[in-house]
């Protein structure tokens, strides 16, 4: 009887607060993500602590960390939320005009800078009541885990070898070029392979520990390495850095051409052949048969097709 009484005190809202607080590891960040006032989240967390008989979050230095008991709750809480979301939405079919289902897309900002604005605009035009959250691909949030635990519905980006246990949909391919300032010596005299390898390169911060980007993975295969002197987690800021320095950014032509009209930049061919950059969307088997997730993937595909080429 005691277990039944405990069960009766738990509602879906509490489970949502629990999962968000534990994944954000912050009451204030959880409040922002939930669209709640911070005192309301604190009150819900107090109830959860009473129900669990555990503090759930404890202070460690200047941050908060989940207790062992809390860590064991993260995956079951995510399972409950996924099941609840699918219970009615997919059972009655997905109608984007009336659905209030939320979508979470993790995306690299290596993408064409037109891509994400167009994707959000399309989703809001066709599914006006559906919240959309664009999540970063950052070193402390591995995309495979995000897909597996329901933290993201799909991931958009490019990787040398995506995990074979994820579903993959190809979006577009892009030629590899170099972006430099017009003042870079290579603009006037060109460059040899040695010149290019020894130049000062800027590259994005890896998406997770140990990750190798497409450019450096290809160089590794040739037994080569370039001189990376700067890294930046905010890929969209790199063209500005290149324009005011002698740094070299090597990435897709489509991305580079979005910046040459408004910044003093030049596009050069690299002195060695790279395979085209392949961009695609990845999703987990858990959403393969979801009508809502299939609709989202189709939106992504159509937006990729709509991007101006060259």
Image: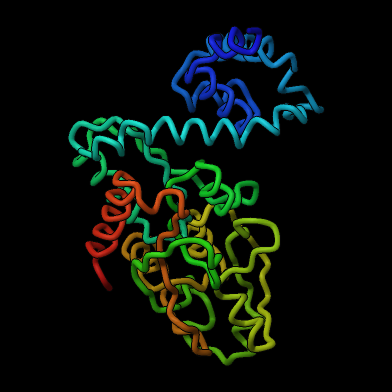
Task: Give the quarter of the figure containing the C terminus.
Answer: bottom left
Q: Tell me the colour scheme of the image.
A: rainbow
Instruction: Name the residue located 48 percent from the left edge and 18 percent from the top edge.
Output: 13
Q: Nearer the viewer, residue 264 or 77?
A: 77
Residue under the image location 58 percent in, 21 percent down:
28
Residue 49: x and y, percent?
68, 14
Q: Which residue sits at x=75%, y=17%?
A: 54
Q: Quadrant of residue 308?
A: bottom left
Residue at horizontal 68%, vertical 75%?
Answer: 227
Query: Left or right: 257 with respect to 286?
Result: left
Q: In this view, does 161 lie above or below 41?
A: below
Quadrant of the rendering where the N terminus is positioned: top right
Residue 101, position in %: x, y? 33, 33
Q: In which quarter of the image is residue 17?
A: top right
* Residue 290 position in % (x across, y down): 34, 47
Counting the numbered discs, the total is 0
Choose between 210 and 77: the one closer to the eye.
77
**Rendering coords of residue 217 (x, y %):** 61, 76
Q: In this view, does 128 lie to the left or right of 27?
A: left
Position of residue 118 in the picture relative to residue 192 (left or right): left
Asked if 217 appears above or below 30 in the picture, the reply is: below
Residue 258 visible in the snapshot: yes
Q: Which residue lies furthest to the bottom in this view?
A: 192
Instruction: Judge whether residue 63 can be spotted in this image.
Output: no
Hey, which residue is sitting farthest right in the picture? 61
In this rendering, the answer to whether 184 lies above or below 102 is below
């Amino acid at each position: 009887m005691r277990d039944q009484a405990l069960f009766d005190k738990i509602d879906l809202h509490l489970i949502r607060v629990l999962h968000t607080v534990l994944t954000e590891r912050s009451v204030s960040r959880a409040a922002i993500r939930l669209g709640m006032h911070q005192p309301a989240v604190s009150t819900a967390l107090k109830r959860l602590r009473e129900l669990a008989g555990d503090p759930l979050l404890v202070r460690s230095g200047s941050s908060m960390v989940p207790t062992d008991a809390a860590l064991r709750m993260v995956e079951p809480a995510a399972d409950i939320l996924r099941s609840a979301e699918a219970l009615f939405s997919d059972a009655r079919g997905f109608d984007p005009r009336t659905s209030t289902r939320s979508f979470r897309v993790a995306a690299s900002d290596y993408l064409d800078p037109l891509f994400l604005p167009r994707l959000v605009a399309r989703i809001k035009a066709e599914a006006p009541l559906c919240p959309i959250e664009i999540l970063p691909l950052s070193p402390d949030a591995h995309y495979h885990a995000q897909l597996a635990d329901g933290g993201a519905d799909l991931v958009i980006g490019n990787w040398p070898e995506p995990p074979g246990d994820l579903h993959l949909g190809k979006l577009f391919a892009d030629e590899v070029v170099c972006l430099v300032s017009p003042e870079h010596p290579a603009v006037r005299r060109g460059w040899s392979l040695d010149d290019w390898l020894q130049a000062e390169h800027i590259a994005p911060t890896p998406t997770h520990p140990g990750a190798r980007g497409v450019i450096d993975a290809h160089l590794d295969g040739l037994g080569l390495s370039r001189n990376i002197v700067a890294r930046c987690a905010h890929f969209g800021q790199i063209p500005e850095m290149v324009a005011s320095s002698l740094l070299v950014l090597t990435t897709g032509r489509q991305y580079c051409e979005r910046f040459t009209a408004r910044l003093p930049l030049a596009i050069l061919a690299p002195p060695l052949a790279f395979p085209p950059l392949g961009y695609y969307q990845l999703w987990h088997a858990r959403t393969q048969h979801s009508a809502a997730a299939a609709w989202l993937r189709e939106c992504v595909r159509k937006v990729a097709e709509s991007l101006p080429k060259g």
